[in-house]
Amino acid sequence: MQEATPTPNEKQRLEALYRLGILDTPSEERFDRVTRIARQLFSVPIALVSLVDRERQWFKSKQGLDACETGRDISFCGHAIKSEELFVIEDTLQDERFSDNPLVIGAPHIRFYAGCPIKAPGGEVIGTLCLIDTRPRSLSDREYECLRDLGMQVESELRINSEPTGIFLLDRFPNLVSSPVASAIISVLLFSFMAWGIVQYDRTYLEALRAEDEKEVVSKLSLVRGNLESALNAKLALVNGPAGMIHATGVANQEAFSRFAAQIGRNVSGVSSLQLAPDGIVTYVWPLETNKAAIGHNLLGDPDRAEAARRAIESRSTWIAGPLDLIQGGTALIARQPIFLPEPSGGDRFWGFSTLLLDLDLLYEEAGLNEAGGDIQLAIRGKDAKGSRGEKFYGADDFEWNKAVMAEVSLPSGSWQMAAMPRGGWAAHYKERQRLIAVLGFTSLLLACLFYIILRMPQSMRRMIRSANAALERSETRFRDAIEAAPSGFVVFDQHGQLAFNNQNFDSLYRSASRSITPGIHYRAFVEETIAAGIYREAPESSDSLAEDLYSLLGEAHTSLEIQLADGKWINILYHPMRDGGWVGFHRDITELRDNQTQLVREKIRAEEASKTKTDFLATVSHEVRTPLNGVLGMLGVLQESSGLSEEQDNYIRTAYRSAQHLLTILNEILDISKIEAGKLLLEPEVFNVAEILSETSELLAANAQEKGLALRLDCAEDLESLVVSADQGRLRQVILNLLSNAIKFTSEGSVILSAESSHSGDREVSLTIKVSDTGVGFSDADIEKLFEPFTQLQTRADRQYGGTGIGLPICRRIIEAMGGSLTAHGESGKGACFTVNVNLPIAELASPSNNRSEGDLPLLPKDRGTTLRLLLAEDGETNRIVVQAMLKDSGYQIDVAHDGQEAVDAVSRFPYDVVLMDVYMPNMDGLEATRRIRALERGKDIPIIALTANAMDGDREKFIDTGMTDYLPKPVKKNDLLAALARATVTLNSL
């Protein structure tokens, strides 16, 4: 395909196109009229007025086409604008420039194109009036002339857009204001105007708010001032009492003064003292006990009090001094009334002072100053009644007097100045306002930016629309290509149920009815046509049922139907609803899939039958072999414990016992490998000491090694002596025994070493490494994987010499992998081998602190006290029952046995037990549920229940106790621990 390239005058051409201001405008009848005429005159399916932009061709008018634009690179008009002559392609498939063009091989499948260049008023070719047909054709001379005439008609309509009329300028106005500079200037002006408006509004608002706040503060201040003046004047009247006494008698003594002062002062709150000071020297005080220190104080000689005293004499009225620190202790407000007595010769003389001391705190409280200080702060100045010149004596040290509202407190002589303002200052009331202004300013900035974006939007939108349309066209082309390439039949029915689109694979599936399947056919008609054409293999009598099944597909979302065609193919039909109400369908050929599924079903049935046969066989063999084998082992065990056997007889019995035990081991291994292959190998975690397992295992095989003259050495790290983990002890022991047995079996001379070490891999996890090495026959590294293949031996000679089934090592590897670890091997032929187990195990606690009890520390048993206690043992394991019964033999406990939780509940409901030993995990009903049910019984509310379990992880003890159990013993249980737990549980019974 030859892409359309820019013209030589591309810049001038685009400028002329943009000056017209016609791109991305709505369709207009004046252009649509021309394309309708062209379509009818030339009998073509498509007629367009196409304007070629920088990267697209956009259709100002279109007939017979849904797309609004296409990419310029694939456009025919992009070639036509390079010449002023008509551009005609009679058969696109025969023209190498267009034969593989997407518009030719895909929709709208152009086979014929004729384009008449359209010029701008300045002569630049900006587009074409073009004709498109889906079949090859040619134009006659007359048709050439008609197409030119129609093209000139389009040009005449375009010249209207180039005339600078008012309407044209109005149309161009959005382009003018959307330029970057104009948009920025308008946005800045808008922001400036909004900011100015916010400032003016805020200034007016703040002035009104300040006036309102001042009004409220003045109101509160006036109320407090009135209360203070009232409280103060009520108390100041008392100072006239002692003065009246002197005027009446002329003399005074302490006893008479105290009696008089008590009468007038004791019922008035806040009065600290009443005093008389003849000649300015304090002589008489009340109450005497607390004011003795003031007697003899010269008021006129004290620098701190002299000025106020002289002012009182000069004014001949009551004068307020202070607040002052008193000689007798404390602080008070002092009111002094000068006393003048008349002289016989006329006139009067200064006698002294009548003094009243007031408690300031009580005065403030009575005036309500403390209550008023909630949302406003108050201050008072004017010490010694000096008004605004006096010192501050009430309020915060940092009080801002210049910002406060003032009020005068009138005194008998002089005054105080009281001030008030909002707590924290006036600005505190406007913080929310400041935040509001900040938000408004930020909002204004956002609006200005948004306005800039809106102004710039016309140009940006045009670019975006052009890009989006081009991308949409490319996407649609890719979508159609992808649908055609899809292996399934693809079909779309619109919201009216009419066929809108389908691909070639869909036509191929319904080839015999393809002539009737055309765009616009209704879905029901499609179903009827395919049934009538015999597309499906269904019998004629079932055609109605088949039709209903097919009809229902377009009504039920995600419902599929598998159906066989007449040619033997199977197809899967699935329809999905679309958001516009239509349906998209997939008709997929599933013939091969059906054949594969049928084959898989047959193979699965055969495999299940074979597995069942093997399982039944193994079950039969296990039952038939284990029954006599258990008898053999049991009898041989009895014989071994018998006395009176000769050494030769004892040797024969031991040999027979080992042979039977070996046969049982082989049987167990076969069953294990069967479980592993079936995925039914289950691990049963329990708590155990690692060092003990290693020691016991090596001791079990020590005799075998000694018989062959081999040195069997255990090399265990010291930290393993105290390492307790939670894992399947039996399975781990089985692995170690198997590895050691193999090492001894395949080693003729030298040694076998069992070593172990650990390292912590987390707070509650340990990484355990166990190695078994020998100096035996060994093997090469190339044979390692064969070792772990079931029923495989490396050497035939070795097989005959040593025997074996070849399944021990595979079982060991599967067990360790089930534990989350690994089993690896390394060897050298003729020099020995080494097998390594690596596994991470959780750390656990072996037992409670009572584990340290020694045999000599056995608790007092019931038999020692001459009593018998009845004990219920709930345990499903026979071995565990035997162990517990043996531990408690001759201890004074009468033992009853329950094999599961239900039996335990039934036993407690029938008999009174003194204590219950409860296994946690049992068949039918576990120990936890059994405990809950026992506690629900009237007889079982107070019975001690001790848990026996292999679980010893963090939180297990709490879980069991929360269930209702009394105590907890982890397995393996030691005799001392068991007896101690029973003693703790039955301590009350033992004391009776």
Image: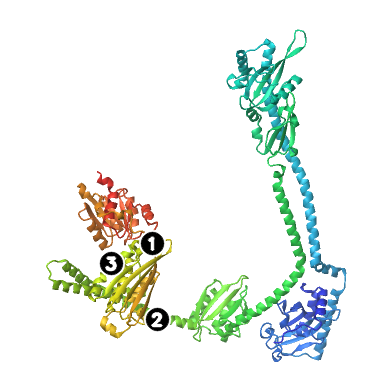
> Which is more N-terminal, label 1 or label 3?
3
Residue closest to the far bottom? 94
What amino acid type is highlighted by mark number 3?
Answer: Glu
Residue 819 point in image, percent of width and height: 38, 69
Distance of mark 1 from mark 2, alpha carbons? 46 Å
What amino acid type is highlighted by mark number 2?
Answer: Glu
According to the picture, the residue beneath numbered tag 2 turns out to be 603
Distance of mark 3 from mark 2, alpha carbons? 48 Å
According to the picture, the residue beneath numbered tag 1 turns out to be 843
Residue 580 point in image, percent of width and height: 63, 70
Q: Check disc 2: other Cα within 10 Å, few if <14, some if 14-19, many if 20+.
A: few
Quadrant of the image containing the C terminus: top left
Q: Are marks 1 and 2 in contact (CB under 8 Å)?
A: no
> Which is more N-terminal, label 2 or label 1?
2
What amino acid type is highlighted by mark number 1?
Answer: Ile
Residue 638 or 903: which is nearer the viewer?
A: 638
Q: Are marks 3 and 2 in contact (CB under 8 Å)?
A: no
The quarter of the picture where residue 759 lies is bottom left
992 displayed left or right of 82:
left
According to the picture, the residue beneath numbered tag 3 turns out to be 696
| Badge 3 element | helix
Q: Considering only vertical position in the picture, is 235 above or below 428?
A: above
Can residue 170 be seen here? The reply is yes
Residue 693 point in image, percent of width and height: 31, 66
Q: Are marks 3 and 1 in contact (CB under 8 Å)?
A: no
For the rendered model, the colour scheme is rainbow
Quadrant of the image containing the N terminus: bottom right
